[in-house]
């Protein structure tokens, strides 16, 4: 079925923006060469893309819960969407990328130091593979520096399940105020307080936990208030320069990105655009592009040390699109078929399209 929105296109665009953002930094470690950072000195295209992923996810995951408000069904869907692609990407990162990232004469030592149980235990927790040193001598010697955000996304899924079970999703004003409180909580003092919670709740980066939950809940609020929000091109024209000006200051950026930034994002998602809507009929390769982007780019830098940022970006896009297609057709799509429910259950709730004003 073709969906009358542009979410598939936006997700692919965001995955490509992550590749664009990482390209100069993975070459020499100079973050200031990244396009958005060089202009605003506060946020990169990569950070903007990941925040937008969480906005979209918040919208769609609350929609999913409302359509099938059963814990077992909800968790089955979320596990089948996240884990298979993640696990395969982790195995490929560990057993293929790892040895290549350690040079040919390091293969024997690499596997001698490999701890198989620890390696697979991390998959259960949606953590990047923990392997012997790789990419030595490069600015970011990490096997896969993109995978760490996935565990935070799954934490947000569990949060929706908890809120849904408690019946709090009907308290829309409460959820809106919670989102606003999280925006205001993006301060060093709040982060130090959050650090007191267990690792399972907040992960290794409490500041990232607050930020991601904030954007996720903001996206959820846009879903819950979808019948009251009108998406207007005129408002977007007014909001866009305000948002751009806010990016020069980290405090105002944190306030405006999950609010008017989210409005602009969802306006982009629901603006009638037949060419973009066609992406809903194409393979959804954005997850694979995101998961394989880091190791592909770091390998290119390793074996082509004089590569330019733009050539790295173009080559990594081509390779990652292939990886994304393979991941979708061989792993993700077959697993997603396992979560399909009878159509009559899906029709229990009418899919309301937000109001769009020209």
Image (spheres, grey):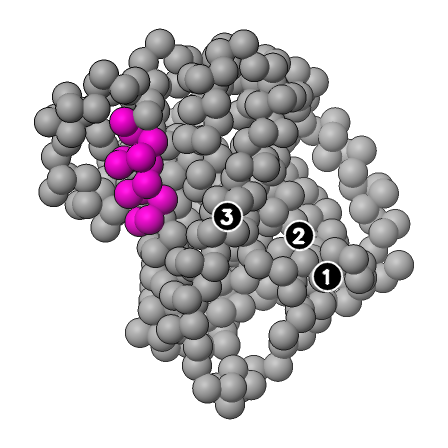
- Looking at the rendering, in which quadrant would you find the N terminus? bottom right
Q: Are marks 1 and 2 in contact (CB under 8 Å)?
A: yes
Residue 225 seen in the current view: yes
**Residue under circle 2?**
9
Provide residue 284's location: percent of width, then percent of height. Answer: 56, 56
Q: Magenta stretch: give its range.
A: 87-99
Query: Which comes sooner in the sequence, label 2 or label 3?
Result: 2
Q: Residues within 10 Å of mark 2 (few under 14, many from 20)?
A: some
Q: Which mark is residue 113?
A: none
At horizontal 35% and vertical 9% (from top left) the residue drawn is 137
Residue 196 found in image quarter: top left
Distance, label 1 to label 2, CA atoms, is 7 Å
> Which is nearer the N-term, disc 1 or disc 2?
2
Q: Mark 3 highlights which residue?
A: 324
For mark 1, what is the residue? 277
Q: How far across and how far down the image is residue 290, in percent?
A: 49, 41
- Viewer-side label of 2, 3: 3
Of the numbered discs 3 and 1, the one sitting upstream in the chain is: 1
Relative to 129, residue 123 above or below: below
| Image quadrant where one finds the C terminus | bottom right
In the displayed structure, 126 sits above or below 336; it is: above
């Amino acid at each position: 079925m073709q969906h009358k929105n542009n979410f598939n296109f936006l997700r692919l665009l965001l995955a490509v923006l992550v590749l664009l953002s990482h390209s100069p930094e993975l070459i020499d470690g100079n973050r200031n060469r990244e396009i958005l950072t060089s202009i605003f000195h506060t946020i990169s295209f990569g950070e903007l893309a990941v925040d937008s992923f969480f906005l979209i996810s918040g919208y769609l995951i609350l929609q999913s819960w409302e359509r099938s408000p059963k814990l077992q069904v909800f968790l089955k869907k979320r596990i089948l969407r996240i884990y298979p692609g993640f696990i395969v990407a982790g195995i490929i990162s560990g057993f293929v990328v790892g040895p290549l990232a350690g040079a040919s004469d390091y293969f024997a030592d690499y596997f001698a130091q490999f701890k198989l149980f620890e390696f697979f235990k991390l998959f259960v927790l949606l953590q990047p593979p923990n392997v012997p040193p790789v990419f030595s001598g490069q600015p970011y010697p990490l096997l896969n520096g993109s995978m760490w955000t996935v565990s935070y996304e799954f934490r947000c899924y569990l949060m929706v399940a908890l809120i849904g079970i408690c019946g709090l999703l009907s308290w829309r004003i409460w959820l809106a105020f919670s989102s606003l409180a999280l925006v205001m909580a993006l301060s060093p003092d709040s982060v130090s307080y959050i650090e007191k919670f267990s690792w399972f709740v907040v992960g290794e980066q409490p500041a990232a936990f607050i930020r991601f939950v904030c954007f996720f809940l903001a996206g959820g609020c846009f879903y819950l208030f979808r019948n009251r929000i009108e998406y207007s091109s005129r408002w977007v024209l007014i909001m866009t320069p305000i948002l751009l000006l806010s990016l020069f200051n980290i405090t105002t950026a944190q306030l405006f990105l999950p609010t008017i930034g989210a409005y602009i994002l969802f306006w982009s998602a629901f603006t009638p655009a037949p060419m973009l809507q066609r992406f809903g009929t194409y393979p959804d390769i954005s997850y694979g592009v995101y998961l394989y982007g880091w190791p592909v780019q770091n390998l290119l830098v390793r074996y082509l040390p004089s590569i330019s940022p733009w050539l790295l970006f173009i080559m990594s896009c081509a390779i990652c699109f292939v990886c994304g297609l393979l991941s979708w057709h061989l792993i993700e799509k077959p697993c997603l078929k396992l979560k399909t429910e009878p159509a009559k259950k899906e029709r229990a709730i009418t899919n309301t399209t937000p109001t769009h004003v020209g």
